[in-house]
């Protein structure tokens, strides 16, 4: 039973994680040096997620991690929903001044 689930998972992941197997994509990206072979992209994402979530004593729920991964992926892929999320979440600044000159820190 487990091998059927693994097969379904890998089949679903193929267009996203195994781009080097896509002949059409290889031809399209040949002039740019081709698709990345290996797991470099995935490893970079995982390192960043670990850095953001492995903060001493913090506990992440599954929903929170899912949200973080969704937003990070949308940002990396320049998905239009990312800009909409930024507009919805980030409030415009309401301060009427700006820091200028030297600031002692």
Image (cartoon, helix red, strand yellow):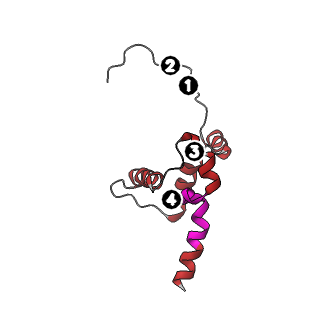
Which mark, by number, is residue 65? Answer: 4
Give the spatial CA distance, label 2 vs label 3.
Answer: 47 Å
The C terminus appears in which quarter of the rendering? top left
Q: Mark 1 packing: few (<14 Cα in 10 Å), some, or many (20+)? A: few
| Residue of label 2 | 98
Return the residue nearer the eye: 62 or 3: 3
Give the spatial CA distance, label 4 vs label 3.
Answer: 35 Å
Q: Of label 2 and label 4, which has the lower sequence position?
A: 4
Q: Of label 1 and label 3, which has the lower sequence position?
A: 3
Q: Are marks 2 and 4 in contact (CB under 8 Å)?
A: no
Closer mark to the observer between disc 2 and disc 3? 3
Task: Report helix, strand or loop for mark 3.
Answer: helix
Give the spatial CA distance, label 2 vs label 4.
Answer: 35 Å
Closer mark to the observer between disc 2 and disc 4? 4
Closer mark to the observer between disc 1 and disc 2? 2
| Residue of label 1 | 95
Q: Residue at 59% across / 51% down in the picture? A: 26
């Amino acid at each position: 039973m487990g091998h059927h689930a693994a097969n379904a998972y890998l089949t679903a992941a193929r267009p996203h994680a195994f781009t080097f197997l896509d002949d059409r994509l290889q031809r399209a990206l040949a002039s740019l040096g081709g698709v990345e072979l290996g797991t470099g992209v995935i490893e970079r994402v995982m390192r960043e997620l670990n850095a953001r979530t492995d903060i001493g004593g913090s506990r992440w729920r599954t929903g929170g991690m899912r949200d973080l991964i969704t937003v990070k992926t949308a940002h990396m892929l320049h998905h239009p929903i990312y800009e909409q999320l930024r507009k919805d979440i980030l409030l415009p600044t309401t301060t009427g001044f700006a820091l200028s000159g030297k600031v002692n820190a």
